[in-house]
Image: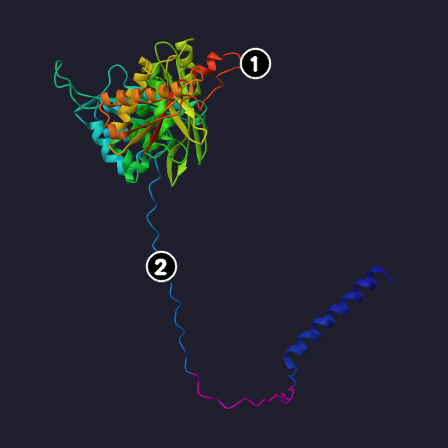
Amino acid sequence: MTKTNAIVFCSIIVVGLVISYFTLDRFAKPVEVADEPVPVKVTEEPAPTAPEPEVKKPKPKVLVVEKPAKPEPPEPKSEGFASPAIAMKALVGTIGEKNFEAFTKLVGEDAIDDPIKEEVKALVESPSFILSDEEPFSEISKSATLVRWALNFEPVPVSAAEPQAVAPRQLYADLESVQNEAVDFKKISLPLLPAAVEGLGSPTANLQNDPLTIAHTFSKAVISRDFRVARALADPEKVTDERVAALMIAVEEGGFDLREKRPLVVTLSREDITWVLARITSRESSSEFALELGQDGGKWKIGGLTFSKVLSALAAQAGGGDVAYSPIVEDPSGGDSLVLYFEFDSAGVTPRGKRQLGIIADILSQGAERVIRINGHADALGTDQYNKGLSDGRAESIRDALVEMGVAPAQVITEAFGETKPRRPNFNPDGTDNPTGRSKNRRAEVYLDF
């Protein structure tokens, strides 16, 4: 087929399609289709019933708890002071201004217990007391974790010629390490005054019932020869009256006083036991006695008392001689006894013995019901009868000296034992004389039967 024939053929086909479209669109009728029934599925429903009454469920109760007001955060604790001395100087400044509010802010609100707060406030603000010019504060003690210092108050004198007849006062300030080498205040407390020792059951006194306070009060009582206070602070089941009195005698004999700087050193500190060294000094020497403190019915008491170093210092001061010296010996039947020594073949009381008896007289003067027993002894030189009379004379000379000092005769009971109860051998094993042993047998032993 040629190209021309193909074009003609295609044109004829297109014309035919156009004519067919117009003819059908104009003359063709719609074909009706019969409707067929649509099957319907019928299901039986239950008869309608009355609607159930609507039950309103109670709304759950919501418990509204009012939260307590959030406490104000405490002021951050200071970073501490470079040293205890710097901390104490800061306290001195607040006391000089009589500013208890500044004092409290410096040490912290929790550092002062409520029962003593008013008393501390009264002392800080008192116009009748000022801090000592010479020593406004001093160090009392030191342990591994705590140091105690004291603020030293003295009464304002009425005039230069008439000083105020009021005893000085102190406040204790305990400081603890906070970081590095810095320290900060932990507690402010009051010393235990001698008049309050017998009232240790009071609320205020209970706050003063810590081992350091007890040790310091006891040590000061020993120095001042206040047997009543010292005895009250010692456990009677563990520390005898004779031991307390002997320590007083030794301290008096040596002219000792508590060291001004850090007189107490804590060597052991636990909840149930504390060991403290009390350091004493005199013009000639320094020494110390040891205190062991424990709990007795919830109260701290002196449960052990050792002063061998004091006796050694006294022996060194006395040097050699015919008269032995030791204010206390152990009783073979238990306990302790005070002891006075005599010169050979003599019943006269030595000057040292009189000083010892002065302290015993002070103790006896604190109660007419207090009775002592004096046992006289002799060495083995001489006949039994002679030595019995010599020992009796020694006991009687002590009794007479005490009566001269104001002791009632009924408070002293004497007994003589001659040479029958030696403390040391009168003779050496080879039968030769033992002068040192005999010097310790020429004695009178004193028992405090309280």
Asked whether 389 or 103 is in front, the reply is 389
Answer whether labels 2 and 1 touch (C-beta < 8 Å): no
Q: Main SS of the magenta segment?
A: loop
Residue 51: in magenta span: yes
Q: Amino acid at mark 1?
A: Asp
- Report which residue position mark 2 lands on: 64
- Residue 388 on image: x %, y %: 38, 22
* Numbered disc total: 2
Is residue 365 shown above or below 135? below
- From the viewer's perspective, is 21 left or right of 371? right
Residue 151: in magenta span: no
Q: Which mark is residue 430?
A: 1
Who's the residue at 30% across and 24% down the image? 360
- Residue 286 on image: x %, y %: 39, 14
- From the viewer's perspective, is 107 left or right of 18? left
Q: Is residue 190 visible?
A: no
**Which comes before the other along the chain, label 2 or label 1?**
2
Q: Which residues are magenta?
A: 32-52
Quadrant of the frame with the N terminus: bottom right
Asked whether 48 or 108 is in front, the reply is 108
Q: Which mark is residue 29?
A: none
Asked whether 392 or 405 is in front, the reply is 392
Mark 1 surroundings: few (<14), some (14-19) or many (≥20) residues within 10 A: few
- Residue 441 on image: x %, y %: 43, 19
- Residue 214 on image: x %, y %: 35, 30
Q: CA distance from mark 2 to mark 1?
A: 100 Å
Examine the image and state in which quarter residue 108 appears: top left
Examine the image and state in which quarter residue 210 appears: top left
Q: Amino acid at mark 2?
A: Val
Who's the residue at 24% across and 27% down the image? 409
Asked whether 385 or 125 is in front, the reply is 385
